[in-house]
Image: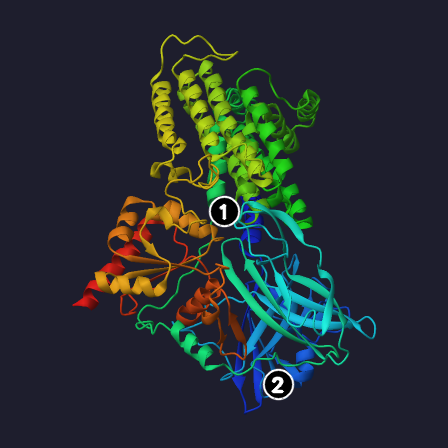
Amino acid sequence: MKKLITLLLLCVSSFAVHAQMDDPVQWTSEIEKVSDTEYKLIYKAEIADKWRLYSQYLTENSGFPTEFMYDSIQQANDFRLVGKNEESKGVTKFDKVFQAELTYFKGTATFTQKIELTNPDVTAITSEVIYQSCDDEKCVLGDKEFTFQIPGKGSAENAFGGQSNVLEPVKWQTSVNKVSDDEYEIVMKAKVDKGWHLYSQKSYGDLGPFPTEFSFADAGKTYDLVGKVQESPTKDVFDKIFQMDISYYEKEATFTQKIKLKDKNTKIINAEVIYMVCDDEKCLPPTGVDFAIALDGKKVAVNNAELTEKDILLSKELDLGITGKDEFKDDTEIAEKSNLSIFFLGFLGGLIALLTPCVFPMIPLTVSFFTKSGSNAKKGLFNSMLYGFFIFLVYFLLSLPFHVLDSLDPEILNNVSTNATLNLIFFIVFVVFAFSFFGYFELTLPASWSNSLDSKANNIGGIVGIFLMAMVLVIVSFSCTGPILGALLGSTTLAAGDPAMKLTMGMSGFGLALALPFTLFAMFPKWLNSLPRSGGWLNSVKVVLGFIELALALKFLSNADLVSHWGLLKREVFIGIWVILGIGLALYLFGKLKFPHDSPIKKLSFSRISLGILVVAFVIYLIPGLSNTKHANLTLLSGFPPPLFYSLYDQQAGVENTEHGDCPLGLPCYKDLDEGIAAAKAANKPIMLDFTGWACVNCRKMEEQVWSQPAVFNILNEDYILISLYVDDRKPLPEDQKFRFDKGNGNIKKIKTYGDKMATLQTLNFNNNSQPYYVLLSPNMEMLQKPVGYTPDVEEYEAWLREGIENFKKKSK
């Protein structure tokens, strides 16, 4: 048993480590001033227990050394390295992985590179480290980019203290390729931080992301553009943020514009890119970057003329003069979801599978076989427990091929949930599973598989024979467990994060639940007497599962419909079909509807009546979802039916109409900041600044799922002045309100649209550029609470709002 338990722990820990440790080395950096021109760039590595990070200076063929790299253009123009990169003391000994003597670090490591500035105007130094870390069994390659802000030269000081919350996940570089005497290729390359997506130049309309756009200042004057901007191959997937097919870039993107000179004295090409970037949870507002590209390849400064009096005046108006920032520091973090929820979902599926006619009758038969075979009771008990463990192990092993697929293509399992064809296939499979559960036909794996394994199990015997018996159970019970496992596969591919790991957790939970009875009843055989007898109720369980399978099948059809924009399964149609299925299930439970294998019902049991009442209650809950009222927002099902805006009605009640600019949920709100502040002063009410975006999915989720709750709605409606500021609004500002803003790090931002202005206002005053972002202020611009972002917990958000009101009352006394 000790060996058995050890093996079980090893199986569980093997995927737990994979889930929790994507990178065993965590990096931090800092810069230390030595003199006016000399600085030390310090890299610190925190190395996970039992892992090793290798030195920079390894002998040839003895492992992958840690290597620090610097941009060659910046190094040539802005600074030079002084000496070698010094590293902390490591351990030198024989390494089992590489079978060689080498130097490595355990626990922590520090690397220090001294530099001397050759360009006094440089504000930041960028670098990258590529490294390998190993334990006694495996090695991991990693890379990390760093940006060192030169002290006193444009480093942004966080208005709330601590590290800046301004995200800059895209870095741009430019170069020039000479084609002929008068033709050149302008190359603009973007490096995208891990986890972020830069979108292509393709336009997606109002509901999609803002495309990457390039403009060239003197095109048609001193030179002509030859064709359009060419871009490197994109990744084409269904985007969960925007619920549509999207083309985007990960890691890097290259854009090339060919030009032909009209004036051969042209030396510099001035260009601008405006782009939007998102990760799986949030999007940043469209951002503009200016380029000054010398045709001879030399580095030149972007032409930023001195700010005019108008620029300075309008820039000052963005500063709200917020007070109380030190008291309410922004320390919000986004928590990651645990894989345990998927494990327990699988466990629940396994418990349901136990109640099916393919599995339930096997429990007493199998346990009796093991406990009564032979004279050695202890051996029979051990074999029965081993049988249960092997059932768990088989389901665990069945999930491992998905890790291989995921390693070959990390997006392959995510694409299952976002590809229209695959979703249609899942829909058809689930419908087939449902009718199998209804008893119209039976799905089984080839009988030759189970017969062959059963024969081998009898002939071989011992531990191998017991393992083969477990596989026989998995095969013969497929007609009942297959549909449940299919639902589990669907739920894991729809989940965020690592789908292969979630599938392993789910199938492990399923196998554990299925295996437990064979172990527990072997340990306590008297419990078998308490088991209900097999009968018609097992078939009833299958029929109920059939209705659930049909309901789940609609989700996959809905995904395909949303992806392809067919408009067939609008929200009300989806909910209407669920209502029909619910009525059908209720009629079946009350004995008014029968299927092929049903036994005659003499008397309705308490469990059937209770479940039938619950189904009727659920149908009643669904009915308002068919209406065009504020009650159509079925928050308990949020994320499962199509979104509220995907409606048969021209305008869904209670949902923001972006075309007319109406406020969310019909709440009174202001889109103009000055008008909102004036209204707050007149009413003597606190302000909630709502930094939002038209393309911000989490903003809509907050409005539909949190703001719609009566307690939160009433507070926003009665106790606050709501000011909604859209940071991605591309509506141009009037000419007299356009200006240029000094970002403080040597770059000038052109404020040309309403969104530019609001995004800059957010960054300047709150040092944050993600949405949704909520700030509570008094009419006199005093902070009343620490700002928060996406907060799906209604009670937490309500408490945050109420505390802001209490703080406002205290400050008003």
On the picture, is 771 further left or further right than 200?
left
**Residue that label 2 marks:** 115
Of callouts 2 and 1, the N-terminal one: 2
- In which quarter of the view is residue 688 placed? bottom left
Residue placed furthest toward the left: 813
Can residue 358 be seen?
no
Q: Please, is residue 562 above or below residue 551 in the view?
A: below
In the drawing, what numbered circle is on residue 528? Answer: none
Residue 553 x, y percent position in the rendering: 54, 30
Kind of residue at badge 2: Ile
**Residue at 58% in and 52% down:** 18
- In which quarter of the view is residue 723 placed? bottom left
**Residue at 40% in and 68% down:** 766
On the picture, is 668 further left or further right than 407?
left
**Residue that label 1 marks:** 339
C-alpha span from label 2 to label 1: 45 Å
Please state which of residues 568 and 503 is positioned toward the viewer in this rendering.
568
Please state which of residues 193 and 89 is positioned toward the viewer in this rendering.
193
Q: Please, is residue 24 above or below residue 92 in the view?
A: above
Residue placed furthest toward the right: 180
Where disc 1 sits, the SS reads loop
Please state which of residues 140 and 750 is positioned toward the viewer in this rendering.
750
On the picture, is 405 further left or further right than 699?
right
Residue 765 x, y percent position in the rendering: 39, 71
